[in-house]
Image (cartoon, helix red, strand yellow):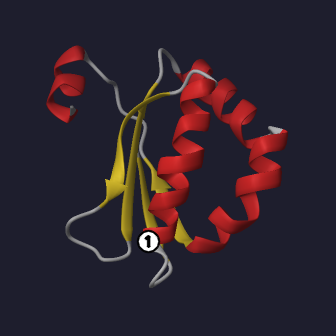
Amino acid sequence: MRLFKLHPGVRAEFHRISDEGTIPMMRRIGINVLAYGPTLNDDDGYLLVRAFASEDERVRLSRELYASPEWERDYDVPVMAMIDAYHTAVIPATESVIARLV
């Protein structure tokens, strides 16, 4: 689970890029995206929830994503410029946890 604090005024563009670019890209390389979008309690908040079979898979697919030519060419600079801070929490995703998220 990743919670982003975006710079003021950029959330709509961040969501557009996520919706049209980064989320489809994640799914193409095999990342299971469970949920993403603006948070309800913070005008500059954004949430991304992904599921992986293991910690090794999370690390491997994340490296593949962020080292890819597509990410570096199309998303690294604009996306990172919109993010003020983010926090990542890795939690066990039992079937009951996943069922409650979707």
In the figure, residue 8 lies in which quadrant? bottom left
Foreground pick, 49 / 25: 25
| Residue drawn at the location 21% of the way across and 31% of the way down | 102
Horizontal placement of 37 versus 100: left or right?
Answer: right
Q: Up-down: is 23 above or below 17?
A: above
Q: Position of residue 40 (x, y in %)?
A: 21, 65
Q: Position of residue 45 (x, y in %)?
A: 36, 68
Residue at numbered disc 1? 11
| Residue drawn at the location 73% of the way across and 57% of the way down | 76
Q: So how many labels did they put on this image?
A: 1
Foreground pick, 67 / 90: 67
Q: Amino acid at mark 1?
A: Arg
Quadrant for the N terminus in the image: top left
Q: Position of residue 94 (x, y in %)?
A: 26, 18
In the figure, residue 92 lies in which quadrant? top left
Q: Hey, which residue is sitting farthest bottom in the picture?
A: 8
Q: Hey, which residue is sitting farthest front in the picture?
A: 20
| Residue drawn at the location 21% of the way across and 34% of the way down | 101
Q: Position of residue 4 (x, y in %)?
A: 45, 62
SS category of the residue bearing label 1: helix
Horizontal placement of 67 versus 25: left or right?
Answer: right
User: How many other residues sit within 10 Å of disc 1, few (<14), some (14-19) or many (≥20)?
Assistant: many
Foreground pick, 16 / 8: 16
Horizontal placement of 79 versus 92: left or right?
Answer: right
Q: Up-down: is 2 above or below 99?
A: below
Q: Up-down: is 25 above or below 17?
A: above
Q: Up-down: is 13 above or below 19?
A: below
